[in-house]
Image (cartoon, rainbow, N blue to C red):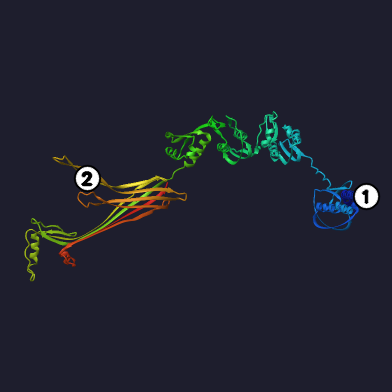
Amino acid sequence: MKLAYIVLCVFLLPYCLKAESADSLRLMRTKELKAVFDSLGVADPVYLQKTDLSVGNVRLSELLRSIATVNQVNLCVKTTQDPLVACNFSRARITDLLYFLCREYGLEADICGNIVTLSSPPQPEPLLPEPFVGYDSVRSALSFDFREVPLADIARRITRLSGINVIVPQSMYTFKVSAYLEKLPFPEALEALASANGLVVNRGEGGVWGFEVSGEQGTASATLGTGFRRRSFPADHLSIDSLKRVSARITSGKLEDILVETCELLGEDYFFATPVKGQTSVYVKNIDSRTFFDVILGGTGVSCGEYEGVYVFGSSGKEGAMVTTRVVPLRYRAAAALPDLIPEALKKEVQVQLFPDLNSLIISGESRKVSAICRFLETIDKRIPLITIDVIIADVTKSTIREAGIEAGLGNAPASTSGTLSAGIDMKLNAASINQLINSFNGFGSVNLGRVTPDFYMNLKFLEESGDIELRSTPKLSTLNGHEATLKSGETRYYKEVASNIIGTQNPIQSDSYTWKSIDANLSLRIVPYVGQDNHITLEIEIEQSEFTGKEEKDAPPTTATRSFKSLIRVKDGEMVLLGGIERNSRDRSSRGLPFISRIPVLKWLFGSTKNNKVSQKLNIFIKPAVL
């Protein structure tokens, strides 16, 4: 038990000694302040006068200034901190009041005659830990732990531990750096140290590493003959992956430095035909090198060309412009139609020539403009959908003809009996047949009919005809998206046109000339398909049907009747749609007979004839588009 007490006492002894030392310093400082203000009262009795003071939440500096103003004493206040003070003093001497405030708020007093200066005590500078630089020779790895240490000291330690030369320009000897990292490979460690402190580190010939300031500040630093190249941006701000795609996040970097660094990381040869000046900022990720060059050179007056694997950079002005020629093959589009589709803004100062043998375009001009046209051609050179359109055309005609009646008369010569009895009755009877029929009725009752003359005839008609005609065709059309597909089917008839000319005046002679002219009656179908992104097809449809209706006069041209239809519809891929209802109905009714009697049922068939003709025509069109 005693041993435990002894150990505890030994453990607490340093803290007790430290606390006692702090109390001793505080007591000594208090005695010194008391002696200072006592001597002040002896030097100037004004400081011994009494004053009343009561304030709440007033800054310490304002409180001291008020004391000096009210009591006509000389005070100079220089404090780093200005806390709020709330106090109430009655009949307190000025020396005691100042002594109390200095003791409470840790102020120091300095007297020069009757002028008192109150100030905060100087703060001790923080003790920085010893800078640590470690090097693992097996892994060639560095470890850092330091803060605000001159760069020259760190470079000296790294060189001494690793045996690798790291140099610092003379202008950066006192540049202070801070870093902390653990066991990072040597190159990555130097890159991290430079990046964290706004510097750039490069490796020159012979494995010598050198630091320099990033950005424009780095222009003042020299290479010191070591052979390493300067960069105006940190090395990790530009990277190339295994597929040679570029990622960059550079702010105010030199254009020439960016081009050189990119070419070297790509492992490509490069050449500057003219000096490249200026700065740029670029933030891109995972793009190809050619696009990267076009992006950073846009609007700079500098062009990039590639000749046999060498990137050439130079001015794009009219004098010595970087001219590039490319042959752009097209996979899906016809090259002949594309030059007119290229916007005029892109074709300015660029020559575009058709090369039909390879379905290609030859483009020649400034490199960046040629690249812009090539990118435009890539966006429109897509596979055009092929649409097949199945069309079913059904033209149905229904007709009904009814004729009934008796027609009798006298001819120029005796007629002969002829006609049909089935199906339907259509007979022509001569006088002999009629007399035989009359003789068969004579002798029945009081009826006795006379004989007819030899030129007498009689026509009997009791007919009904009906017919259904269905014309069906199934054409199949194919066209590209947005292009027109047409179908035309019909017949042509000719008529004679006579022109009469009279020649001469004394003995006029009439000369007739004949011209045969044609009239068409067709069924025409026009379809324009548009394929949407949602597997729907928009169809622009125009249908026109014309047919011959006969001649009104013998030598007149044939007349036609026309039916047309125009629509814009939207259907799914492979869905069938019906375009129907184009219907034409005609009805012709005529009758002949004795007045009044021809209107009486049954008798109208004996003393007259009637004819009823009804025709109905209907056109139905089925359309089924499908994308191949």
Q: Which mark is residue 480?
A: none
Question: At numbered mark 1, what does the secondary structure look like: helix, strand or loop?
Answer: helix
- Of circles 2 and 1, which is in front? 1
From the top left corner, tell me how far across and down residue 421 is, in percent: 16, 59
Q: CA distance from mark 2 to mark 1?
A: 148 Å
Q: Is residue 599 left or right of residue 267?
A: left
Total marks placed: 2
- Observer-nearest of 312 and 67: 67
Report which residue position mark 1 lands on.
Answer: 42
Please report the residue visible at 85 percent of the width from the left and 52 percent of the height from the top.
Answer: 68
Residue 89 shows in the view? yes
Report which residue position mark 2 lands on.
Answer: 497
From the top left corner, tell me how far across and down residue 12 is, in percent: 87, 50
Question: At numbered mark 2, what does the secondary structure look like: helix, strand or loop?
Answer: strand
Disc 2 vs disc 1: Cβ atoms closer than 8 Å? no
From the top left corner, tell me how far across and down residue 555 is, in percent: 20, 49
- Observer-nearest of 571 and 353: 353
Disc 2 marks a residue whose amino acid type is: Glu
Farthest residue to the right: give it.
42
Residue 201 shows in the view? no
- Crowd rating for badge 2 (residues with CA inside 10 Å; few <14, some 14–19, many 20+): few
Q: Measured along the vertical axis of the image, is residue 528 above or below residue 342?
A: below
Quadrant position of the N terminus in the picture: bottom right
